[in-house]
């Protein structure tokens, strides 16, 4: 059972839902410590007071705001937990919005909200079912770790989830990153859509979505522990230059189909057209050409002298 990160309540109009907040995710990354290479002694970071020039213990350390170069205003954890804010003890729901209207770039870490005690069971279930039936998410404010935050509440497997959200002014303007102006043909767009269709799936379960980086690190650690040779790294593929975009799309579709055991022949991509080619003939023109070709075929070739 994950530990409780924060305890408070969800404020939904005049309805209050006591809750405990627990982390919804786990980090399985391989962790490293710093060591002195000469003797493999552990290297640690020690905290020194620059005024007394000595190491200080954790219970001697607190927070402070530097007002001027000479003056610091001390702020205690108790003062932070008792800020004069309605969001200091509660997650205040401000509005309900369509899920599709939320930019994923603003969504951060996820937390499960657990009902706190029997008194919370009914209002918790009420909010959960209302969210599920409305197909909307709640936008709320809450105060953690010395700052007020924006959050998003949604339902996942009958549990209410809180996602931390970034404020609008925390999202950088990407306009300066746009590529130079280029022209795309409809065939190229259709080709990209065909590739997307080939790579589409209904879930994110499978071998493609496992953490191979952590597995590779564990292989190295195990090899060194057993004094075996280290596993060889695969040769990186040479990045190719895209000269013909349609040809690259066609090859990509073939590889995607082959990896899924499907027919690798590409039938749904438009063929690359030469920009200098003439327009497609009309039905009347095509019929005239067929008749002309038939007459030419009936004629006997002349013998050369």
Image (cartoon, rainbow, N blue to C red):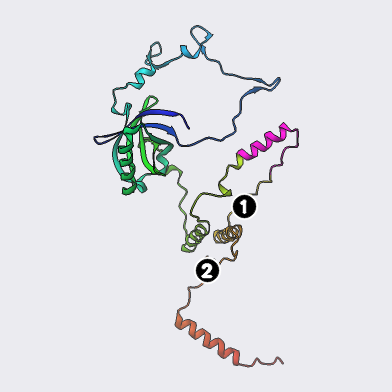
Q: Is residue 230 magenta?
A: yes
Q: Horizontal and vertical percent for residue 27?
A: 53, 35
The part of the image, by quadrant, that contains residue 110 is top left
Residue name at image x 57 percent, y 44 percent:
210
From the viewer's perspective, is residue 300 above or below residue 158?
below
Packing grade of label 2 (10 A; few <14, some 14-19, many >=20) is few
Instruction: Tell me whether the residue at label 1 lies in contact with that at label 2, contact meaning CB atoms closer than 8 angstroms.
Output: no
Residue at the spot of label 1: 240
For the question of whether residue 170 can be seen, the reply is no
For the residue pair 297 and 197, the one nearer the viewer reads as: 197
For the residue pair 18 and 60, the one nearer the viewer reads as: 18
Packing grade of label 1 (10 A; few <14, some 14-19, many >=20) is few
Residue name at image x 61 percent, y 40 percent:
213
The numbered mark at residue 122 is none
Q: Which residues are magenta?
A: 214-233
From the viewer's perspective, is residue 97 above or below residue 47?
below
For label 2, the SS is: loop
Residue that protrudes farthest toward the right in the picture: 228
Tally of numbered tags: 2
Name the side, left or right, on which 98 lies relative to 211. left
Which mark's residue is nearer the viewer, 1 or 2?
Answer: 1
Name the side, left or right, on which 10 lies relative to 2. left
Q: Is residue 227 magenta?
A: yes
Q: Horizontal and vertical percent for residue 97?
A: 31, 45
Q: Horizontal and vertical percent for residue 225?
A: 71, 31
The answer for how far apart the CA atoms under marks 1 and 2 are is: 26 Å
Name the side, left or right, on which 133 lies relative to 291. left
For label 1, the SS is: loop
Residue at the spot of label 2: 276
Residue name at image x 54 percent, y 61 percent:
246
Q: Earlier in the sequence, mark 1 or mark 2?
A: 1
The C terminus - image quarter? bottom right
């Amino acid at each position: 059972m994950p530990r409780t990160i924060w305890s408070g309540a969800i404020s939904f109009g005049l309805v209050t839902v006591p809750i405990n907040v627990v982390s919804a995710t786990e980090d399985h990354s391989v962790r490293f410590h710093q060591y002195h290479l000469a003797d493999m002694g552990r290297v640690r970071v020690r905290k020194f007071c620059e005024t007394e020039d000595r190491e200080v213990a954790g219970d001697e350390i607190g927070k402070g705001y530097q007002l001027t170069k000479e003056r610091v205003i001390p702020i205690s954890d108790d003062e932070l937990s008792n800020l004069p804010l309605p969001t200091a003890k509660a997650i205040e729901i401000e509005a309900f919005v369509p899920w599709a209207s939320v930019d994923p770039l603003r969504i951060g870490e996820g937390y499960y909200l657990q009902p706190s005690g029997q008194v919370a069971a009914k209002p918790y279930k009420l909010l959960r079912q209302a969210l599920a039936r409305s197909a909307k998410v709640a936008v709320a404010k809450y105060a953690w770790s010395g700052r007020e935050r924006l959050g998003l509440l949604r339902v996942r497997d009958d549990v209410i989830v809180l996602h931390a959200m970034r404020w609008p002014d925390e999202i950088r303007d990407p306009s300066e990153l746009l590529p130079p102006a280029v022209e795309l043909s409809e065939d190229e767009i259709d080709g990209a859509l065909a590739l997307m269709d080939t790579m589409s799936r209904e879930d994110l379960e499978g071998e493609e979505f496992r953490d191979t980086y952590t597995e590779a690190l564990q292989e190295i650690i195990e090899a060194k522990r057993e004094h075996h040779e280290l596993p060889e790294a695969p040769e990186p593929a040479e990045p190719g230059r895209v000269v013909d975009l349609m040809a690259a799309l066609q090859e990509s579709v073939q590889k995607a189909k082959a990896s899924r055991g499907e027919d690798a022949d590409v039938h749904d991509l438009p063929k690359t057209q030469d920009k200098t080619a003439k327009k497609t003939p009309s039905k009347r023109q095509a019929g005239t050409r067929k008749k002309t070709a038939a007459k030419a075929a009936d004629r006997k070739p002349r013998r050369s002298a």
